[in-house]
Amino acid sequence: MSNNIPQLATLWAAFAAIPSVFLSRASRSPGSHAAVVAIPRRTVGWALRHGLINGQARQGGVDIMFIGESIVRWWTRDGHRVWERYYGHRRGLFAGISEDRTQHVLWRIRHGNLRGIQPKLVVVQCGTNNHAENSAQEIAEGVNAVVDEVLARVGGATVVLMAIFPRGRTPGPARDTLDAANALLAERSDEDRIRYLDINDRFLNASGLISEDLMPDGIHLSEAGYALWAEALEPLAAQVLGNAFAPGA
């Protein structure tokens, strides 16, 4: 990590120098909106995490990559045992930063998260943090911009476009917005190199309430939630990667 400190200091200095007027240009650009305009977040922690992901990518040898926000980030915490079982032997990389919105993920992809690697499978899970500031249409456009950027940078990859996971213990406006965005994202399910995967019903009971066993806070996954996700991905992962997870590991 010490070898990266000068680079990260330079990166942070560059972020700090970006004029606020530029960072807010999405609101002033006709025909545009914030969810599709790539910008960084101007915090030290975010810059450090972005630099760490770039450093891991530079090491190469990545076959499967997850990219998104905190739900991806916490593969390292609540999902770490599931990760080791399913992806530890598969040269995986998780590129998640908590609280990122689509515009931040888009910026990260354009600034190193995919540089120098050619993963066979890229799993995209983002958009939930846009729910308060963007419409369903805008959220879908933001997620689609992320997917398109991945496809442009990783020539032979298959992209798993995940339906944005349900948000909130009970049905409500946030869930409705994300459900509407998912309906738009599902329209890409027949595109070449894209596999749309919606497992949201598995997180809900018959009344539409989120299972606390799978999402204790109504947003983030428990270990059981990560296991459910990995199990749903496994048929496609085995097909694309050409190997299976280690049963009983």
Image (cartoon, helix red, strand yellow):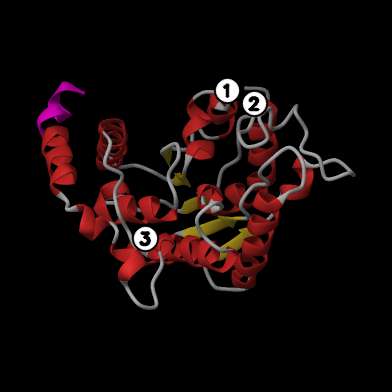
* Marked residue nearer the N-terminal end (3 or 1): 1
Question: Around disc 1, counting alpha carbons within 10 Å, would you say few (fewer than 14), some (14 to 19), or many (20 or more)?
Answer: some
Residue depth check, mark 2 versus mark 3: number of the one nearer the observer: 2
Q: Furthest residue to the bottom?
A: 31
Q: What is the x, y in percent for residue 227?
A: 67, 32
Quadrant, the C terminus: top right
- Secondary structure at badge 3 equals loop
Q: Could you tell me if the residues under marks 1 and 2 are in contact, i.e. CB atoms within 8 Å? A: yes
Q: State whether residue 145 appears in this view.
A: yes
Residue at numbered disc 3? 154
C-alpha gap between disc 1 and disc 2? 8 Å
Residue 116's mark?
Answer: none
Between circles 1 and 2, the one closer to the viewer is 2
Q: Quadrant of residue 24?
A: bottom left
Please tell me which residue lies in front, 109 or 97: 97
Please identify the dominant SS of the magenta region: helix
- Percent across and percent down for residue 44 are 25, 32
> Which residue is painted at 17% across and 38% down in the image?
12
| Front residue of 238 and 125 | 125
Which residue does the numbered mark 1 point to in the structure image? 81
Residue corresponding to mark 2 = 223
Q: Is residue 100 above or below residue 141?
A: above
Considering only order in the chain, which callout, 2 or 1, is on the residue closer to the N terminus?
1
Secondary element at tag 2: helix
Which span of residues is magenta-colored? 1-6
Q: As rendered, which of 54 and 17 lies closer to the eye? A: 17
Placement of 30 over or under 231, stated as above or below: below
